[in-house]
Image: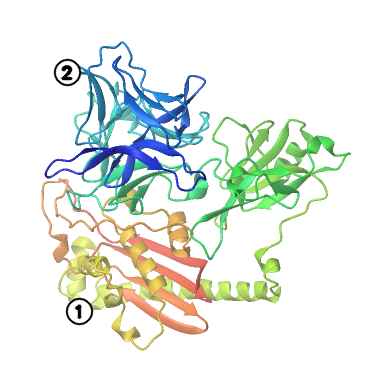
Amino acid sequence: MPLTQAKPGHLQITLSFWALLEWVPHPYIISISTTGVPIWTADSVVNGTTSTSAAVVDSGGVFQFLSNGNLRLVNGSGATVWTSNTAKLGVTSASLDDTGNLVLAANTLAVWSSFENPTDTLVPSQNFTVNQTLRSGVYSFQLRSDGNITLTWNESVVYWNQGLSSLSASNVTSPTLRLQPNGILTLSDASLRRSENVAFANDYDVGADVVRFMRLSSDGNLRMYSGGTTAMTWAALADQCQVYGYCGNMGICSYMESSLSPICKCPSLNFEAVDVNDRRKGCKRKVEVENCAGNVTMLELKQTKFFTFQDQQIVTIGITACRGNCLSSPSCFASTSLSDTNAWCYMKNTPDFVSGYQGPVLLSTSFLKVCGPVQPNPSPLEQSGGDKKCSKLYFIWAGGVVATISVMAASSGLFWWFCSKNSPKFGSVLAQYTLLEYASEINEKFSEWAYGEFEKGNVEAIVDRRLADQVVDMEEVTRAVQVSFWCIQEHPSRRPTMGKVVQMLEGIIEIGMPPPLKALTGESSCGTSTNLASIPTSLFIFIFIISNSSHTAFHFRENYGEAIFIVVTIISNQISLAFMVFTSSFFVQPTCN
């Protein structure tokens, strides 16, 4: 029988058995849940050590509170699969409170609680400290003593971290992480004057009664949710392929144009999947290098990088030497040449784990030692039986896009010059603010109006009415509108990077719900006030769509001190990579005297 805690005005909390329907026969786990969402699960114990998987029992399983103060989960056979280890500690009571915390207490003193022993989930009112860990499979989430929060693979590779400024972190002694009911993740410490905001949910400050939680998933990503398990409002890594080891050893993570989900593949036909039914388990060589009879060579993988979070042999050499040095070194079996401002070569030595990422925006080239001859994977064009003439058409089309961008930049400059020279109103505003003006048919602030329409699902209202007789792909329009609202967020830290904008527009990564646009207060650092909402500034977002030889255009006008020009080309209803975002800041802050 489930144990339920429910008070008027509070969420219903339940302690009960859950059946794992994906397994046959169906095992059961003991879990605490709120409105159907598991927030704590008893972990299994292997050789006296807590495992990263839930403790499962058969249909005869029992969850018991013993007279010696111990809480335990036993199987139908009587074998103990989980225990709280609180025997002989004076425990006299077990209670489930309305926050979801299961507490074992000695009179009024808490001896053990589920909040102090989390599994993979955090909820509001739950403190997360340095000595605690969230675990899911080979991944873990921790709070470090310096205030850094980290995601780690296999207890060895930290592939994501976020922390305080160096000034704040220098005095931190005992930091505490907490998910606030409004959707903001905060970090507090006795040395800090106030809590630091670490992360924001997309819907933060929206709805005080929203069910929120943060979970570390088995795919290695940390996410916030609201209203249920499907409404994701924040993710530590927007690009899932950035998770170390996501595709297993020797696996390459990438995306297909037709899917938003990452796929795992082997580096070449020289490899085969460890498990064809689960590509995330990685790949293995068909012929090991040590079994080659003097035929070892290097497989070249363009636009691919092997993650190198742990210490590696790093040398400053060119791409050719990066390949050759690894080939000639008995200990090296893979290398990555980063083609950025520095010619860096990362050498991976046996028995390092190889986690790869391949994508069109990556500038790096990687090499992997194989037993020759090299057998590359067939290209998507070869797989679809495409004609090589398509590649020539692609370059012709790309040249046209570049030409279009050049014309737009020149036109924008001429328009700016013309307005500043011939518009008295523009000139008077320019003297103080240096603005870009354009007539608007909407009296209220356009961004707030547009966001309201978008929130109601009425994207059609935002599209230029002159396109009423045109065929417009509203799915692509909606994606562009979402990106636009992310790009004009008030907090710079919340605006996506250029690389993310590319992937968002292409549909490579999921676009979360943009937070509501915060109204500008007009407060300056000088103590003076200026009502920027009344300034007739404009933000133009021009998006040109070329689809099946039909040309359409729509623009959005915005009262912000920035101009963002986006060119997106769509061929065969797929967003291609060719586009440009040009940003220029036109607002000049008043001088403090």
Measured along the vertical axis of the image, is residue 344 above or below residue 230?
Answer: above
**Residue 407 percent across, percent down from the top left:** 45, 76
- The structure residue drawn at horizontal position 52% and vertical position 71%, both measured from the top left corner, is 402
The one of 32 and 475 positioned closer to us in this rendering: 32
The one of 297 and 106 positioned closer to us in this rendering: 106
Measured along the vertical axis of the image, is residue 369 above or below residue 74?
Answer: below
10 Å neighbourhood of mark 2: few (<14), some, or many (≥20)? few
The one of 44 and 218 positioned closer to us in this rendering: 44
Q: Which residue is mark 1?
A: 441
**Residue 550 percent across, percent down from the top left:** 48, 84
How far separated are the C-alphas under marks 2 and 1?
65 Å
10 Å neighbourhood of mark 1: few (<14), some, or many (≥20)? few
**SS class of the residue under badge 1?**
loop
**In screen coordinates, is 538 left or right of 60?**
left
**Residue 590 percent across, percent down from the top left:** 18, 53
The quadrant in which the C terminus is found is top left
Residue extending farthest to the bottom is 469
**Residue 521 percent across, percent down from the top left:** 14, 54
- The structure residue drawn at horizontal position 29% and vertical position 12%, both measured from the top left corner, is 89
Q: Earlier in the sequence, mark 2 or mark 1?
A: 2
- The structure residue drawn at horizontal position 57% and vertical position 58%, both measured from the top left corner, is 360
Measured along the vertical axis of the image, is residue 319 above or below residue 496?
Answer: above
**SS class of the residue under badge 2?**
loop
What amino acid is at disc 2?
Answer: Thr
Measured along the vertical axis of the image, is residue 124 above or below residue 89?
Answer: below
Quarter residue 465 falls in: bottom left
Q: Which residue is mark 2?
A: 108
Q: Is residue 142 visible?
A: no
